[in-house]
Image (cartoon, helix red, strand yellow):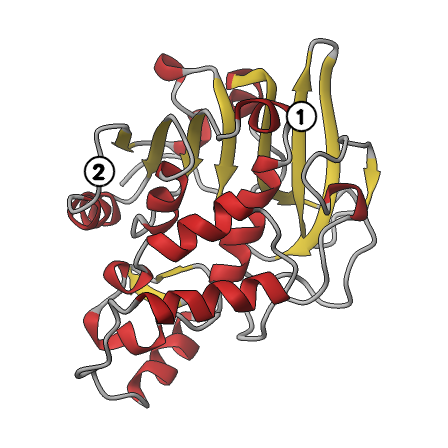
């Protein structure tokens, strides 16, 4: 989770800024501040208390999601598949009703157990990066996706709108059950929710065309790399090579091996092993 409520600043590396761009090795220029997908739970709760529960706000009105999508477009999100999914999936349906008034702001919100739903801007950016991978460009969708960290299920629903199959793992049983309930109203036949140790991935359904993680460790787990299909792409936070904080790491698997690109500085919750 994050240590700030600031909106993310900076942009993606130039070599990944447009669909169709060829992956490249190197380190992108880092912004002055980390890209923080979430914020301190106390801050989210504090802000929520300042708002009365929504009444007659018309949260199902597509115009509210349209305004969110337009802000994302202005902030540099260009992938139409991502924007269309965020226009379709109702974010307010994945947060507590008392917080629904903030659902379409670019802010994280508490979902219980000290966890939060990530900012729409960060979710959109990370999924857009998946679409810049070779397999996604060729197929026009994300193929078979492995998501590490189901949370409340919002990103899972977005991925499902763009993928052939989504396998999503959550280590916290209560959140796994929460996501299962909240995704029940969606078309879930191609979503497989699993309670387990995300660091191990899920070998039975490997290989995956796309892998995305919402928690960062010292390094990208070898299990994830082994389960990434040739031509596939992984996007996950990991410890920066200089040891100073986290960066987004983009890994493309080719016939010759793995091609790693370093993205923006970020701050995600730590990746933990085990399930509880």
Q: x and y percent of residue 142 in the render?
A: 49, 30
Residue drawn at x 55%, y 63% is 72
Q: Residues within 10 Å of mark 1 (few under 14, many from 20)?
A: many
* Left or right position of 137 against 30: left
Q: 9 or 162: which is nearer to us?
A: 162
Q: Which mark is residue 187?
A: 2
Query: What secondary structure is found at the residue carrying circle 1?
Result: strand
Q: Which mark is residue 127?
A: none
Residue drawn at x 38%, y 65% is 65
Q: Find residue 103 and report its image quarter.
A: bottom left
Q: 84 or 15: which is nearer to us?
A: 84
Q: Which residue is mark 1?
A: 252
Vertically, is 101 above or below 263? Answer: below
Q: 124 or 64: which is nearer to us?
A: 64
Q: Nearer the N terminus, badge 2 or badge 1? A: 2
Q: x and y percent of residue 174 in the render?
A: 20, 49
The answer, for residue 55, to whether it is visible in the render is: yes
The answer, for residue 1, to whether it is visible in the render is: no
Q: x and y percent of residue 195 in the render?
A: 26, 34
Q: Residues within 10 Å of mark 2 (few under 14, many from 20)?
A: few
Vertically, is 194 above or below 204? Answer: below
Residue drawn at x 51%, y 23% is 209
Residue drawn at x 75%, y 31% is 23
Label 2 vs label 1: CA separation? 29 Å
Q: x and y percent of residue 84 in the render?
A: 44, 50
Query: What secondary structure is found at the residue carrying circle 2?
Result: loop
Q: Can you say which quadrant of the picture contains the C terminus?
A: top left
């Amino acid at each position: 989770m994050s240590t700030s409520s600031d909106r993310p600043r900076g942009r993606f590396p130039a070599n990944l800024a447009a669909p169709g761009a060829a992956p490249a090795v190197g380190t992108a220029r880092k912004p002055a501040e980390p890209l923080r997908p979430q914020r301190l739970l106390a801050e989210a709760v504090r802000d929520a208390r300042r708002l009365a529960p929504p009444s007659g706000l018309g949260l199902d009105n597509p115009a509210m999601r349209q305004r969110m999508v337009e802000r994302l477009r202005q902030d540099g999100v260009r992938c139409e598949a991502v924007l269309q999914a965020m226009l379709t999936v109702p974010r307010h349906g994945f947060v507590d009703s008392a917080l629904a008034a903030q659902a379409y702001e670019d802010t994280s919100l508490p979902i219980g157990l000290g966890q939060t739903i990530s900012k729409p801007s960060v979710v959109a950016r990370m999924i857009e990066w998946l679409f810049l991978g070779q397999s996604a460009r060729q197929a026009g969708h994300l193929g078979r996706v492995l998501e590490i960290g189901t949370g409340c299920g919002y990103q899972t629903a977005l991925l499902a709108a763009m993928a052939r199959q989504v396998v999503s793992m959550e280590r916290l049983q209560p959140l796994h059950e929460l996501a299962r309930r909240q995704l029940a109203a969606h078309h879930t036949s191609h979503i497989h929710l699993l309670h387990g140790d995300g660091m191990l991935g899920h070998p039975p359904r490997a290989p995956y065309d796309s892998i995305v993680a919402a928690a960062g460790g010292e390094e990208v787990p070898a299990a994830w790399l082994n389960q990434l299909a040739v031509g596939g792409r992984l996007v996950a936070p990991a410890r920066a090579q200089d040891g100073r904080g986290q960066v987004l790491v983009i890994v493309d698997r080719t016939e010759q091996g793995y091609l790693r690109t370093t993205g923006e500085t970020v701050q995600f919750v730590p990746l933990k092993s085990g399930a509880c």
